[in-house]
Amino acid sequence: MGARRPNQRSSIYLGKDGCWHGWVTIGVKADGSPDRRHRMGKTEAGVTRKVRELEGQRETGYVSKPGRIPTVAEWMGEYLDVLCDRLVLSEKMAPRTLADYRSKTRTWINPLLGKHRLDRLTPEHLDTAYATMLRRGLSPSTVLKVHRILSRALRVAVRRGRITRNVAALIDAPSPASHQIEPLTREEARRILHVATTKRNGARWSVALALGIRQGEALGLRWSYVNLDTGVIRAWFQIQRVEWRHGCVDPRTCGEQWHRQPCKPLCKRHRHLPVCKPGCTQKGHVCHKRPCLPDCTGHAYKCPDRIGGGVVFRQRKGKGRLTLQCPPALLELLREHRKRQAAERLRAGNSWTDHDLVFATRQGGPITRTEDWRSWKAILREAQVRDARVHDARHTAATLLIEQGVHIRVVQEVLGHTRVTTTERYTHVATLQMKDASERMDQALWGQG
């Protein structure tokens, strides 16, 4: 009687079908039965190579789970709908972050990489996809965001045993485009504040330029966190809108009437009028840049059974307990703003929705980011100030503090940054400081005495 074969010994044999077969014992399944993997090929050498590769993965612990390996599109759906959705519910991920993940996955990852099986995805596939994005006009920063989303999803797949390696970690990440930030000058900031005093919710821009808080933090500021006696402001939360989801059985059919169909090469539905100016972008005159995909399940905000959407207050980014001291002039503006809002509340009567917001609509509801952006742009035009982003007000606040001689560690506390290196990216050496440094060097090298 022959000796017993050792445990987990692999077997290779020639089958009756004329092919070579190999079996490798990986471990134990969840139900307690042996987890044996099968490999087959036309030659013994080919199957031996596959068996040794699987044995090597077993020894290193990098073996995928049993069962069918999902495609990239299937895994991204599970990653976003299960894992990321749980992170949003536990407040470890912002709702807008998940919305951005879904948008970039739907628009770029799935169309370019979705059909690849997860374990057969190669670095070359990613290189080709990123090159396609750049050729289609995407900025390097957007391509970098797509790369990071995919890399995080693959990293989770490795941890969960779906695949053995993260191919996104094997390539060089796309380099973001360098963006030259130009904060507003002190004179420009004062012109903006002068115009803002004539506008409804004008104190909103005084808060932005004086305290440097983010857009979501300013729009989510509540009176219960503002002490109008001491001037202490607790900017602890941001206001964000959660995406609506379909509550119906067939999301594709539900949103069919709002789907943006792709145009033919010689589109006759969209055309300019004789009176159109060059570069006209009026709706109905130009084709959709991003039409809906064949499997589009969007437009959930129009679903009659929509669920999950709305406005939420969540803890701010960075240091969660950011407490600021309001300048005396700004404190007076906020007191006046409170009085005007109280008068609006009386006029609104029962139509007023109380969210305790410092900056609200005429019915007390939250101001959308788009409305806030339009107000900012209108003030810039009226003040005859160059075009700037809403976030540039935060850069401006940091730069003005540096100009006044405030130490960068104090600026770090005002902006609520965890690391001072982050604050350094928000501050910019102003022309006045450069001139002062030049005069000091002139005195040091060529001055008298």
Image (spheres, helix red, strand yellow):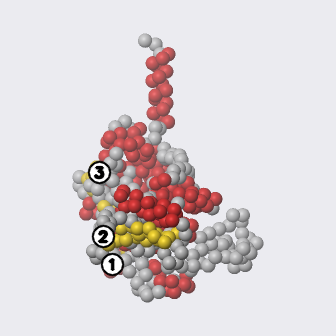
- Above-or-below relation of 57 to 266: above
Badge 2 marks a residue whose secondary structure is loop
Q: Residue shown at 42%/76% (left/top)?
A: 244
Q: Which residue is mark 3?
A: 324
Q: Which residue is mark 2?
A: 1
Helix or strand or loop: what does disc 1 sit on?
helix
At a point 76% along the width and 72% down the height, the residue shown is 274
**Can you give x and y, in whole percent of width and height, for residue 445 in the image?**
48, 17
Q: Is residue 371 above or below residue 395?
A: below
Q: CA distance from mark 3 to mark 1?
A: 33 Å
The amino acid type of the residue labelled 1 equals Gly
Residue on which the image places disc 1? 349
Residue toward you, 322 or 298: 298
Marks 1 and 2: CB-CB under 8 Å? no
N-terminal-most mark, 2 or 3: 2
Whether residue 336 is visible here, answered yes or no, is no
Front disc: 3 or 1: 3
Along the line of sight, which residue is nearer the eye, 296 or 281? Answer: 296
